[in-house]
Amino acid sequence: MPQTLVDALADVRALLLSPHLTRAVAAGRRRGTPPAVTRAELRLVALRAGTHLQIVTSDGTRPTTRNLPLGAPAEAAVDQLLAEPFGNWHVETATGTMQLRVTKKGAAQVHRRTEQRTVAEPAGHDRAKQYLLDPDDPLFAAIGASSAKRRQVDAFLRALAATLPDPLPTGPLRVVDLGCGNAYLTFAAYRYLADRGADPLVTGVDVRDDQRRRNTALAAELGCTEQVTFVAGTIAQVTVDPAPDLVLALHACDTATDEALARAVLWQARWVLAAPCCHHDIAAQLRQRPAPAPYGPLVASGILRERFADVLTDTLRATLLRAHDYRVDVVEFIDSQHTPRNLLLRARRGGVPDQREHLRAYAELVDQWAVTPRLQALLTADDQPAPVN
């Protein structure tokens, strides 16, 4: 049954003061009403004086930590936080999770989940798997994702979890999903980040306007039109303002992955996760000219040439990203039985001490194989993206 906001906040209060509290985060703002702090995180801590409720608040610049004894002091502090107009509450206990979001009309949207259930792997695996988003989450029913797509999205979210810092930054976390298609990842990333206590503002980009209309209607159905929006346009030309902190691209075909990576670099995004799809561009270039000695046998067979083109393409992408001050991991984000396109470029901006060395290695590879990677051309183009109306 639907809950009033007063009743939902009363449930949150009971969980915050429960001895089974694990972690709770308040973030975001209600429409037109900012809270006194941008974020609050609560957890139980064991001190010499006994168990205390630790409350860490941030005003966007520096955190403030208070350790309060259980009883009246903790209750008073919790009541003060609940009186603040936070837009989201995420509460984890030993037995489950409660997510409260306050809609733009001031209504309570509540999602509860019992302790993460264990789901058996497909035949051939004797171990169990825990999903970051429960496969029975109403989100998946709304967006119509197949079981295979759910597995891919869950695996992608795990890679995202390993990329972002803990705790997440305070304030809005701006996310762009380039080539979003049916927006399975767009909505799942929003739900996952909101469940972690972030304040995500997610934009899905797809070239088809009918997809934009469909996905916008889904956002309305799920009650997140203020947090999840969609734009019709090409990856190379779409305008996103302000620039995103996090760029996602799941199986953008061929050079569309290069366009996604180039946009991320030009936006100076802090984090980038891109799972490439097909690699036709470099493969076609390899067919047009002889291989450098002594590597002729490496590309003499069509199937080997195609596979080598995959490796060379993503090697050049990763090396060029490192030359642009991104720390890059190349990983398999899901088992190949679920999709053969299971490679993921996972990048974090900053902290690359030898950018010139990576640029030198990149130039040597390009010269030796006489190829012109699309990513290089995009990053050196003089023209700037035009707005999308």
Image (cartoon, grey):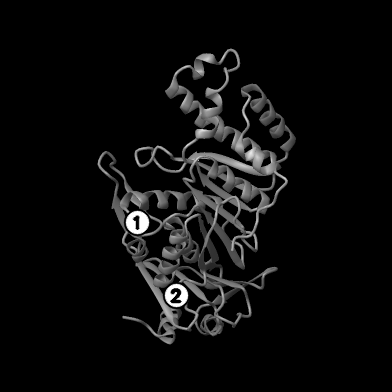
Q: Quadrant of the N terminus?
A: bottom left
Give me the residue at 57% from left, 53% from top.
247
Can I make out residue 167 in this image? no
What is the three-letter code of the residue carrying label 1? Answer: Ala
Q: Residue furthest left?
A: 123
What is the three-letter code of the residue carrying label 2? Answer: Leu
Establish if 224 lies above or below 365: below
Q: CA distance from mark 1 to mark 2?
A: 24 Å
Residue annotated with mark 1: 145
Q: Which mark is residue 100?
A: 2
Q: Secondary structure at mark 2?
A: strand
User: Considering only order in the chain, which callout, 2 or 1, is on the residue closer to the N terminus?
Assistant: 2
Establish if 120 lies above or below 42: above
Q: Residue furthest top?
A: 294
Q: Residue furthest front?
A: 389
Q: Quadrant of the C terminus?
A: bottom right
Q: Verify CB contact (< 8 Å) between mark 1 and mark 2.
A: no
Can I make out residue 272 in this image? yes
Mark 2 residue crowding within 10 angstroms, few (<14) / some (14–19) / many (20+):
many
Give me the residue at 40% from left, 67% from top.
218
Q: Residue furthest right?
A: 356
Q: Nearer the viewer, residue 367 or 29?
A: 367
Percent coordinates x, y for residue 289 in the rendering: 58, 20
Establish if 222 lies above or below 73: above
Q: Secondary structure at mark 1?
A: loop
Percent coordinates x, y for residue 22 in the rendering: 46, 66
